Amino acid sequence: MSCRVFVAAALLGLASLRAQESESLAERGLKQLIEQQQALMAEAAKENPKFDEEAFAQQMEQVCRGYEALLRANPNLAQGYAAYGYLLSKLDQRKQAIVMLLKANELDPNQPLVKNQIGNYLAEEGKPLEAVNYFLAAIKLAPREPLYHYQLGTLLHEARDDFITSGEWKADAIDRAIHHAFRQAAELAPDRIEFTYRYAESFYEMNPPDWDGALKAWSELEEKAPTPVERETMRLHAANVLIKQDKRDHARALLETVQEPALQTQKQKLLDQLAKPAES
């Protein structure tokens, strides 16, 4: 090998090594910024009467400047744009956040968190037909993330009329999709009450209804409920389902066990239903 070729190869290897070091430094810097923002957010979430909002804002501003410096030095760091966009969305800087998220998506279209956050932005902007594609893309990339299924179900439910009016969705198809999305979320995260409760509620929206499935869902929730008022809330739902099944004696017996003062208004409404003649 000639000296010139050897030197050229050495320089190429050195450039490659420096690129690897630069990438490693960028990743390390990103990790540190994420850890800082997580620590600040965790502190802000605590119920601390002595929480210093001014100090929090100053520290968060430092983190933001850190992201901006990192991205100036590493303009192709997709995960950096994603993390910064996520932080800005948490700080309610939505327009700045979406710029970062779209850039992250452009650089790396395989980040499910980015897809989900863009979907959230579009949903909040009143663009459900655009948002749904991003939620579906997030689910395709991370099918075992329960939050993505839950947010898809929520979007379909809240914008149901928009989807039907578009002509791209039939009413029965969207109702099945809503129920399926909440079921997936509940099955993937059975300890998340917001997911399992919403799944149980979705039985009310099915046509034709699956009351046996609904009764099972509310019974399972009652077993897991940690407090008396929560257990009796699930019992009220179960009684409601029994009324719809025309199992009136069973419903009445169940309602007699609801004693929490906070639930007496809901209980009375169901008792009033029982006082009416059964529908033929």
Image: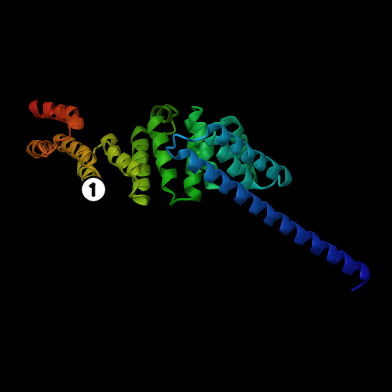
Q: Residue at x 52, y 36 (%)?
A: 90
Q: Residue furthest right?
A: 3
Q: Residue furthest front?
A: 50
Residue 2 appears in the figure: yes
* 47 vs 36, nearest the viewer: 47
> Which quadrant is the C terminus positioned in?
top left
Q: Position of residue 173 (x, y in %)?
A: 36, 37
Q: Residue at x 24, y 40 (%)?
A: 230
* 6 vs 66, nearest the viewer: 66
Quadrant of res 48: top left
Is 2 located above or below residue 78 in the figure?
Answer: below
Q: Residue at x 34, y 50 (%)?
A: 187
Q: Position of residue 88 (x, y in %)?
A: 57, 36
> Which quadrant is the N terminus positioned in?
bottom right
Residue 277 appears in the figure: no
* 162 vs 42, nearest the viewer: 42
Q: Residue furthest bottom?
A: 1
* 92 vs 1, nearest the viewer: 92
Q: Residues within 10 Å of mark 1 (few under 14, many from 20)?
A: some
> Helix, strand, or loop for circle 1?
helix
Q: Amino acid at mark 1?
A: Glu
How are the residues colored?
rainbow
Q: Position of residue 269 (x, y in %)?
A: 16, 27
**Residue 99 located left or right of residue 223:** right
**Residue 232 located left or right of residue 274:** right
Q: Position of residue 118 (x, y in %)?
A: 54, 37
Which residue, given by chain and number where applicable, does mark 1 sit on? 220
Q: Residue at x 37, y 33 (%)?
A: 157
**Residue 93 located left or right of residue 175:** right
